Image (cartoon, rainbow, N blue to C red):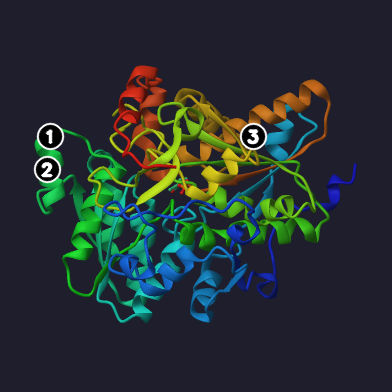
Amino acid sequence: MSNEKIPYKIYLEESEMPKAWYNLRADMINKPAPLLNPGTLKPMTAEELSGVFCEELVAQELDDTTKFFEIPQEIRDFYKMYRPSPLVRAYCLEKALGTPAKIYYKFEGNNTSGSHKLNSAIAQAYYAKKQGLKGVTTETGAGQWGTALSMACAYLGLDCKVYMVKCSYEQKPFRREVMRVYGASVTPSPSMETEVGKKILAEHPGTTGSLGCAISEAVEKAVTSEGYRYVLGSVLNQVLLHQSVIGLEAKAAMDKYGIKPDIIIGCAGGGSNLGGLIAPFMGEKLRGEADYKFIAVEPASCPSLTRGTYAYDFCDTGAVCPLAKMYTLGSNFIPSANHAGGLRYHGMSSTLSQLYDDGLMEATSVKQTDVFEAAEQFARVEGILPAPESSHAIRVAIDEAIKCRETGEEKTILFGLTGTGYFDMVAYEKFHDGKMSDYIPADEEIAANIAKLPKVEA
Ligand SMILES: *Cc1c(COP(=O)(O)O)cnc(C)c1O
């Protein structure tokens, strides 16, 4: 076997790091559907969007044709502090599984935010600063995005207001404290600080919140505060664009050693890490240059691709955001409170939704106890304590490697290890104490939310 030649960790030289982000939409024949104005049901114009988002980010959001966007030097310099992220050959996991499969993972947990989110946070904060804004508002679920944005804002001297999903705020007090280290203000959502927060609390007293609620609050705060714009950590095209740095680095590192993955796996919350990881590989597939199998992995408790409907829906619970066409469980869908494993968003990036609808990508859902089992199996041999979100991808990578053991196929598997799980010890504790259950929504619950989708003609 020629395995010996491939190091445990493949790093790129500074000079080999990507100088431009890759815009996958430019190679898509069926473009993702445009965002719609919920009032007129017409595509959102740049002018309308720039009330909420920074101008340069609006331009990136609406651009379906430019293949490459140069990464500004200041962002490239920031990336150099924690990138390239390592591409690791999981020799130890392969051995433990007794599989002939070759497993690689791209590890994005090597920065204080503990996840890939910093890749887009620094870009979004950079454009906000460039526009001369005072600050930005955002939501955070598990806390990684809020942490990443706080870091980026501290670096650039911007104010940062974070609405944190209440159950995470309570479960992860140390996450909140990290954000405060970086100077952000953190409010549990839903809150009484915004009109939409008050309304949600009146309708759902005692709710533990959701990403959809927190987004509504952060948007309201941005549009009612002078010199502020809203930034979002996932779902949007611009975020997938920034996250393409993951896939570009992974592909460059693999090309360096002549490795071609057969299967590429990523967890899917709003779709940004997966969209970024697969981008250059999917580009080759779209252009007919190579073929890959792509698998999106989502939690069985929040299965937007596998059990949702492809339709226009609100991106947030309070229905203040534009409509996006996506696989959705309905913007009122709130995953059960006993769901610990992240990836709680009701919808999915419109780019990934279109690729999935076109049959270019597969999707599967996994139960959280199976996810934590895979997380521990991985932690014990590979040394890294993975985030629950990332562990969805680990679960499916292990399952695919076990299939190879059964068939004897030497497939090459690449998966995205999006982050570390140090702030998720309450979830790990529940798993150890046998207190973690596998809540799977009933068809009726999903149907009831789908019935409330806004009515938009195709
Ligand atoms: C936010 C997050 C995810 C999910 O978000 P995507 O936009 O789907 O990538 C996955 N893993 C980690 C560690 C995260 O912080």
Q: Indicate which disc residue 199 carries.
A: 2
Q: Is residue 442 visible?
A: no
Q: How much space separates mark 1 and mark 2, taking CA atoms?
A: 6 Å
Label 2 element class: helix
Query: Are there few (<14), some (14-19), or many (20+) residues within 10 Å of tag 1?
Result: few
Above or below: residue 444 compared with residue 77: above
Residue at x-position 78% and y-position 51%: 288
- Tell me the element at label 1: helix
> Which quarter of the image is occupied by the C terminus?
top left
Instruction: Give yes or no for contact between labels 1 and 2 (Cβ–Cβ under 8 Å).
Output: yes
Residue occupying image coordinates x 51% and y 57%? 240
x and y percentages locating residue 61 in the rendered image: 46, 63
Q: Is 262 situated left or right of 243 in this image?
A: right
Residue for point 38% across, 52% down? 144
- Asked where in the image residue 85 lies, by quadrant, the reply is bottom right
- Amino acid at circle 2: Lys
Callout in the foreground (2, 3): 2
Amino acid type indicated by mark 3: Ala
Vertical side of 396 occupied by 319: above or below: below
Residue 295 at x, y = what percent? 62, 37
Residue located beneath label 3 in the image? 397
Crowd rating for badge 2 (residues with CA inside 10 Å; few <14, some 14–19, many 20+): some
Closer-to-camera residue (446/393): 446
Q: Nearer the viewer, mark 1 or mark 3?
A: 1
The residue beneath circle 1 is 203
